[in-house]
Image (cartoon, grey):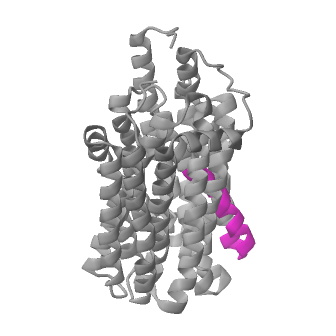
Amino acid sequence: MTEVLPAHDIVTIQRRTIGTLVVAQAVGAVGITIGIATASLLARDISGSEEQAGLAQTFQVLGAALMSYVLARLMSRRGRRVGLVTGYLTGAAGAVLAVVAGVVGSMPLLLLGAGMLGATTAANSGARYAATDLAPAENRARALSIVVWATTIGAVAGPNLTGLSAVVADRLGIPELTGPFAVGSVGMVAAAIVVAVRLRPDPLLTAREVAGEPVGGTVRGTSWGRVLEALRAEPALAAAVAGLAGAHAAMVAVMVMTPLHMEHGGAELRVIGIVISVHVLGMFAFSPLVGWLTDRAGRPPVLAAGGAVLLVSLGLCSSAPEGSSWQIFAGLFLLGLGWSLATVASSTLIADLAPLDSRTDVQGAADLTMGLTAAAAGGLAGLIVASAGYPTLALAATVLALLVVLSALVAARHGRSPSRT
């Protein structure tokens, strides 16, 4: 490796990158999570069918999956900054469409808006990888986890702004359930501005410059060809992608149907919002500790621990009665914590093992796989709940949690020490 920048300059750029991403994640997360507690309810009201209640969240997850790959390709050519700004602004436009859909009562328009909203989720996911571009291997998980942790600020605040968003909706003369999307669009635009102004120099382009790689990206083969080559060369990398997908699918499938399960038992919207906040707290608040543990104990052991926590959470959710209960509070918190353990560990493995010249290709494909799996799980969740109930859904999701544990075992068997590049 031929360094063209002094080491202290790289450290300075890395610190600036982390600071910028933390602020962007905090305000952007408000935009993406404020509608979680109401999306399924809005879809049910517009469609008139509880079986379609999960479609809005499913389309958002599907949109996130597709946009993950689109943004990754854009980042490969133009850098992280352009890709992240594009994702946030696309999500903001989707939030506005969701408001319009609620006003005119159009389910197709709601699903289109939800799909575009997924671009913000994709941008937030891309930001965690941006944190690792210039990070040394021994601190890579902590760098990633700090950016994931920043989501806590907006993500916990978001669902709790549901009440305030109702006031905003009343002032604007729009349906109450569309208020969160109106407020959320502001957060997404703010995140785009922060990244556009502050993410300079671009961390990915700087990493390529330091490594002597073409700044504009490689032209070797096709994008998917590079991905498949990397997965074949590193079984642990393929296992990390599988673990990432399994954890996210289990989390999404149960989380999107929880508001409906609680409402059936008479839980108020305020209480539903609190449960979602507790869930999101589990997802993000302990990320720095998870990152430290991942750097110290290793990626596969933490990935396995994530799968184990997911199994416990799903057991609690399966026993939760309709409405508000300690089981649903504890189950949703542990669902978030298990997701955090699995996501930080598997994402760090992907950052460790993906070659620099195909880094964004592999990361985009990993998030695409994660999103498509979760979208399928979310779509099936509504059907399972409608036909067999929420407890059956939670038990069915244990298959995905077991996939996480299996992925950890494969990664431990075939893994190698992470590169410092």
Q: What range is drawn magenta here?
A: 101-121
Q: Is residue 11 above or below residue 57?
A: above
Q: Position of residue 388 (x, y in %)?
A: 49, 91
- Image position of 68 (left or right of 22): right
Most foreground residue, 348 or 157 = 348
Q: Is residue 52 above or below residue 219?
A: below
- Residue at position x 41%, y 40% in the image: 147
Residue 176 visible in the displayed image: no
- Image position of 391 (left or right of 52): left
- Residue at position x 62%, y 51% in the image: 119
Q: Position of residue 400 (x, y in %)?
A: 45, 68
Q: Position of residue 355 (x, y in %)?
A: 55, 32
Residue 344 part of the magenta segment: no
Q: Residue 79, located in which quarter of the rendered image?
A: top right
- Residue at position x 57%, y 16% in the image: 209
Most foreground residue, 160 or 407 = 407
Q: Position of residue 245 (x, y in %)?
A: 51, 58
Prevailing SS of the magenta stretch = helix
Residue 105 part of the magenta segment: yes
Q: Is residue 277 above or below residue 319?
A: above
Residue 382 visible in the displayed image: yes
Q: Residue furthest bottom?
A: 387
Q: Residue 211, located in which quarter of the rendered image?
A: top right
Most foreground residue, 19 or 161 = 19
- Image position of 225 (left or right of 246): right
Q: How many marks?
A: 0
Most foreground residue, 13 or 73 = 73
- Residue at position x 69%, y 44% in the image: 224
